[in-house]
Image: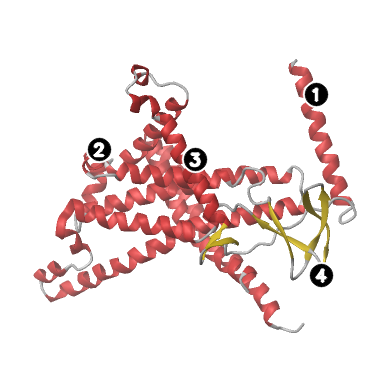
Amino acid sequence: MTMDADVMRLLAAGLAMGLGAIGPGVGIGLVGLGGTQAIGRNPDAGGVILTNMILAIAFAEAVAIYALVIALILLFVV
Amino acid sequence: MKKVGTIIAVLFVLFLCAASIYVGAFNGEGAKFALPHIQMAPEVLFHIGSFPVSNSMIAVLIVDLLLVWGAAAGTRAIRRGDESALIPSGWQNFVEWVYETLYDAALNVLGEEKLKKLPGVVTLLLTIFIFILVANWIELIPGFETIGWIEPAEEHGYTLQQFGPVAALVGPVVEEGGYTLLPILRAANTDLNVPLMLAIVAVVMVQFYGVYYLGKGYFLRFFNYKAFSHGATGIFEFLASVLEIISEFAKVISFSFRLFGNIFAGSVLLAVMAFLFPFLAPAAFYFLELFVGFIQALVFMMLTASFIAVALAGHGSEHEEEHNAA
C-alpha cells in the first residue's frame, strides 16, 4: 500500500479523533462519578451540583471537540 | 378515537420501516439521497460591492430578526403601559418565563448585588443564551441546509431530477457532469466567524466588567507587581499572573471552538446519517442535536457568567467569592 498524502490524511484524521477521545471520555466519566456521588450524599444540593457538573463536562468535552475539529480540517480542508 | 390513532401510528411506523428496507436493499437502484458537499468554510452566495455575503450571514440575520420580533411582541403590552401587562398571558408569559429562568441561573453564579450593579450583564448573558439557542435550533428545521441553488460540480456530483420549476439531486454519484447543492441557509454556528464573534464579545465584556467593578486594580490580575512586596520570591506569582493573559486568549479559542465544533460536527452528522439511512435513524440524531444545541448555549452563558465572577473577585480573594455567591 503506497503511503501517499491522501492515505496519510485519512489515517491522520482517524487517529486524531480516536486518540483524542480517550482522555475526554475518561474525564467526563470521572466528572459524572463525582457528580452523582455528591448528589447521592446530599440530594438537597442537587441543583448546584448538577450545574457545576454540566459545566465541568462541557470543559472536558471541549478537548474532544478540538480533536474533532482537527480531524474535520484534515478531511475537508485538504 | 385513541385506538384509531394508535393503529394509524403503528401502521405509519411499519411503512417507514418497509420504505427504509427498500431504500437500503436497492441501494443505488431506488431513491438514493445525496450527500451534500461538506466544507468548513461557508459558501458565498453573492457579493455586495466587494463584500461577500455567505449563507451563514443570512441565517444570522434571520435569527436576529426572530429575536427582535419575539422580544418586541413579548413586551408590547409593557411598553404601551397597558394594565393587562401586569398579569401576562400568551407570548408575554413565555418571554417572562424564559427571562426569569435565565435570571435565576445567572443569579446562582454571580449574586444579586453584582447583577444589579453591573450595567447590562443580564442583557449580555441572556442574549448570548437566546441567540445561540435559537441559532442552533433553527438549523433543525427541515430545509435549512438542504434548499438552495444547484451548481455543476467539479468532482463527483449527483444527477438532477426536475419537478417543474424545482429540481432535486438524486441518483447515483457520477464522476463528471454531476451537480451539487449550494445551500441558501446554513446554521449560524457552523461558520467559525459567529462563535468567534461571540467569544470575543464575551471575553472583552469580562475585562470591561472587571475594570468597571474593580477600577485600575483589575489589572493586578495580569501584572501582579504587588507580589514583589513579599520579597524576590514574588517573581513566581508575577509570572503566574502574566500567564493569565495567555489564559484569556485561550478562553477565546476554547469558547469559539467548543461551540463551532459541536454544531458543525452535528450538522455533518445529520447530513451523513440522512445519507446512510434516511428513514427513522436521523430522528435519534435530531434529538441529540436538539440536546447539544441547548447544552452549548447553556454552557456558553454559564462560562461567561463564571468568568465574570472570577474577574470581579480580583486577585487573591477568589476563594471567598465562591462561598459568598452560593
Most distant residue in the front direction: B49
**Image: B230 above or below B171:** below
Q: Earlier in the sequence, mark 2 or mark 3?
A: 3
Circles 4, 3 touching at the beta carbon (< 8 Å): no
Tags 3 and 1 on a common chain: yes
Of the residues tagged 2 and 3, which is closer to the observer? 3
Using the numbered discs, state the Cα–Cα distance from disc 4 to disc 2 in whole angstroms: 64 Å
At horizontal 37% and vertical 17% (from top left) the residue drawn is B84
Tags 4 and 2 on a common chain: yes
Which residue in the structure is indicated by mark 3? Answer: B66
Using the numbered discs, state the Cα–Cα distance from disc 2 to disc 1 in whole angstroms: 54 Å
Say left or right for A76 vs B71. right
Question: Within 10 angstroms of label 2, few (less than 14), some, or many (20 or more) residues?
Answer: some
Which residue in the structure is indicated by mark 2? Answer: B112
Q: Quadrant of the C terminus of chain B?
A: top left
Q: Position of residue B199 (x, y in %)?
A: 40, 57
Circles 2, 1 touching at the beta carbon (< 8 Å): no
Tags 4 and 1 on a common chain: yes
Tags 2 and 3 on a common chain: yes
Q: Earlier in the sequence, mark 3 or mark 1?
A: 1
Q: Quadrant of the N terminus of chain B?
A: top right
Task: Pick the residue in front: B297 or B90.
Answer: B90
- The subunit letter for the residue under badge 3 reads B
Which residue in the structure is indicated by mark 4? Answer: B176
Using the numbered discs, state the Cα–Cα distance from disc 2 to disc 3 in whole angstroms: 30 Å
Task: Pick the residue in front: B51 or A39.
Answer: B51
Which residue in the structure is indicated by mark 1? Answer: B7
Of the residues tagged 4 and 1, which is closer to the observer? 4
Q: Position of residue A43 (x, y in %)?
A: 41, 34
- The subunit letter for the residue under badge 1 reads B
Q: Judge whether residue A52 can be spotted in this image.
A: no
